[in-house]
Image (spheres, coloured by chain):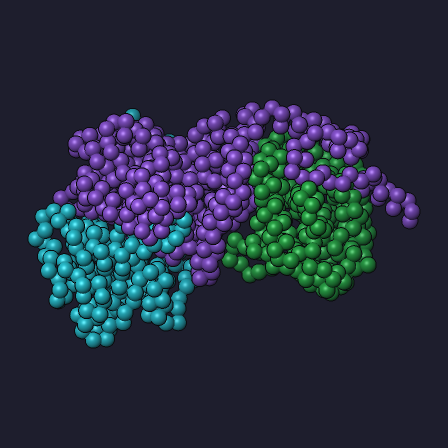
Chain colours: A green, B cyan, C purple
Amino acid sequence: MDVALFIPCYVDQFYPRVGLATAEVLERHGVTVHFPEAQTCCGQPMANSGFFDDARPLARKMLEVFAPYEHVVCPSGSCTSMVRNHFETVLPGDPRVAGLRAKTRELCEFLHDVLRARPRGRFPHKVGLHDSCHGLRELRLGSGSERLVPAFSKMRTLLDGIDGLQLVELARADECCGFGGTFAVTEEAVSCAMGRDRIADHERAGAEAIAGGDVSCLMHLEGLIRRDGKKLRVLHVAELLEEATR
Amino acid sequence: MSARDEILKALRAAAPQTVPLPDIGRVSAVRYPDVRERFAKSVVEVGGRCVLVEGPLEAALAAIPEYAAARKVVSLVPGVAKANVDLSSIGDPHDLRDVDFCVLPAELGVAENGACWIVDHGGANRAAAFLTQHLAVVLRGDSLVHNLHEAYQRIAIPSPGFAMWLSGPSKTADIEQALVIGAHGARSCTVLVTAQAS
Amino acid sequence: MTEHAARAAEFIKNDARLHWHDQAVWFVRNKRDIARSFVPEWEELRSLGSQIKAHTLSRLAEYLEEFERNARAAGAAVHWARDADEHNRIVHGILRENGVTRLVKSKSMLTEECHLNEYLEAHGVEVVDTDLGERIVQFRREPPSHIVMPAIHLKKEEIGELFHDKLGTPRGLADPKQLTEAARVHLREKFLAAQAGLTGVNFAIASTGGVVVCTNEGNADLGTALPPIHIACMGVEKLVPSPRELAVFLRLLARSATGQPITAYTSHFHGPRPGASMHIVIVDHGRSRILAREEYRNSLKCIRCAACLNTCPVYRRSGGHSYGVAVAGPIGSVLAPHVDPKKHADLPFASSLCGSCSDVCPVRIDLHHQLLAWRGELAAQGLVPLRKRVVSRVGRWVLARTWAYRFFGKLARIFARYVPNPWTRQRELPPMPRESFRAQWRKRVRAR
């Protein structure tokens, strides 16, 4: 199976190890991984601020870059959601959008739904899982605490076979970390208050590390953790799986 | 053009294509193994008391401390011994300001929320039901339904008129979310579920 | 910094108070979760509620005409107001005609929107808000900070001080039960002295011409059972077709609002009390304009339960007053820009777009999608700060060109730590790697 990696711009530039871990994990499941080098950004930061017209050329570029591939996998719930849920708004009437939407998946959902992966490995640590809001409520990677639906979580299911891994129980299962894109800067006080509260929840629950599916959330949480001198490790689920299945 | 016409015109112009009304009959609303037990539990959960009346109603009323201590009692349920205010003779509802206890009949009770459907409340003098310090509601045991959908299928809503769902005593949590029973209306509500018909 | 951001920053300065407010409101979200767990068909109910409202809105004019006919037949007078001013004049007109100078009021967010209290007071009418939370904020001469719990931002000690000042309660008394008792005695006198009672309308039933008012305190009932005049104010969107549909909303409302299965009083008013009069004031005030906008139409489904406020991580950490409008939180941020897009351009951005609001909404309003739609509209109208527009344009230019993206990405990694940046006020920058992912990937591919 051939898969094209869609690596978010901030992962490419600031957290390359997440991209590498994503590729590793996919390859270990027998996937041939391609990285179309022309890709840049899905346009989410612009759309997030209301500038859909600025996102348009970037979305078009994405359509062209990924056209030749059958599967597109992205280690980010928010960027995947941009493609699946917002490209239609940014490029209304463009017939190519439907195709890209149908074949673009976030990493956990690709592993869980398409590869039906149930990795076995070892990661003997107490970990707090951070569900990103886009992953949870836009892509429905999990049931979420708001709705009365049968409980499920693709991320947790993938981690079921990892020995020694203890997932801690948080007081607030899926409250937003406060990154929110440009919100992180324009409403800085609220954003950091939200982030600190999430971190405190993980700490009180006994987490040694926080793992999640979105580097945007993790970047924000890690930024606070390091500024506040705390000792929690922050890592992407891809990194956890890569380490666990070596 | 009148305001009415302008508003209706604007609403017609703005209206999207007609969306069909969904069939509410399809919903599989919650039902309970024991409707009476659930009703009693719900009444307690909303801050009221629920008493299953086996003997005479008066005995059950006398067992309510607030009734026993009451001096001015209004009753829309006939045959209540301590009732000493004839609502029909009251010309001004303000005269009911010192009513201690009020007994009201309910047509129906709903298990999911402990609510009682009250239609007979004194008409022009319905203030008695709200000025009273304490309330008792008399409900027949065979007038219980599981949920509000069943309830609305069975009740008649008087028009013109006033009717209400009463669920427990008045309450508020407006001060630091501390639940206080007895806000502006009744401080207590005892639901007496009778076994016999009428 | 936007208005909301500035006020929020102030709110957050008091760390203890911030967490107290956040926990207090989260507690209500929690209660909703528990209540919902007793209704296995909850998600189905939400869908039904949403569809019923969608249907009603698609035939609103017809339903309003039916409602008016039936309300009149039951003996109520029906008035129509195009906007807030007209609403205020109509209400005052009714009071003036009847020589009313003492009015008691139960909760109505519509009258908050219209600033009715100020209007009436300026015209010599004493207005007493009778909901305990509303009376508290009325004493303090401030707006409510929450639709359902108007005084949620206040501690009991503050309320104790207020009551000592206004009601003569002993200094230092802060026990909620005793404070409520003092308010009961005080407001009872107001109910008895009132010459008219004004209520909001939770639901208006088209097929019967009745209005339904839900309270826990019984204040709407005391306010309408004693004075000889009942004025009920409602937005056009409050209609439901018949009692059968009403059942759906009554099952959703209190559970979503406070975690109760139903409010203590759910009063169905069909016409006035014998010997009294009833006036219903139907208000548009921008609702027909919202109905015309497909992206925002769903916001008219709102039943004002405040579940979205309770779940909103931003509302909980900034408080209702930081929004500067009568109705705060997610629904407030979606409704306010219709009234004044320039003044309220900050509100759709006072959100991380987490989507929790949409998932708790009992009528499935797609709140977080509407917030994003507003951002697009405000940006197109030029109401988003220039700085942001410039950054977006520059970003677009760079990111549209792979070579520029690679070049500036590398520059960012090298120089970011030296450039002052709002991010770094409270957070460390990500550790800037020497090589990007794509550079490392190339090496990896070559090595094979």
Please state the horizontal and vertical placement of residue B61, each as a whole percent of the image. Answer: 20, 68
Seen from the viewer's position, the closer of residues C15 and A49 is C15
Residue displayed at 10% across by 57% down: B86
Task: State the residue at coordinates (57%, 60%).
Answer: A151
Q: Position of residue C326 (x, y in %)?
A: 40, 36
> Is A136 placed above or below C108 here?
below
Would you place residue C377 above or below residue C108 in this image?
above
Q: Which residue occupies the foreground of this view, A41 or B139?
A: B139
Residue A149 shown left or right of residue C263 in the figure: right
The percent position of residue C424, horizontal first and vertical second, equals 68, 35
State the residue at coordinates (36%, 48%): C174
Q: Name which residue lies at 22% across and 52% down.
A: B130
Question: Number of callouts in the render?
Answer: 0
Q: Is residue C116 left or right of residue A42?
A: left
Work out whether A143 lies above or below B32: above
Residue A139 visible (yes or no):
no
Q: Residue furthest left?
A: B89
| Residue C62 spot, x, y in % from top left | 33, 40
Task: Choose between A82 and A230: the one closer to the eye.
Answer: A230
Q: Quadrant of residue C32?
A: bottom left
Q: Is residue B30 visible?
A: yes
Kindly indicate the quadrant of the structure image that contains residue C79.
top left
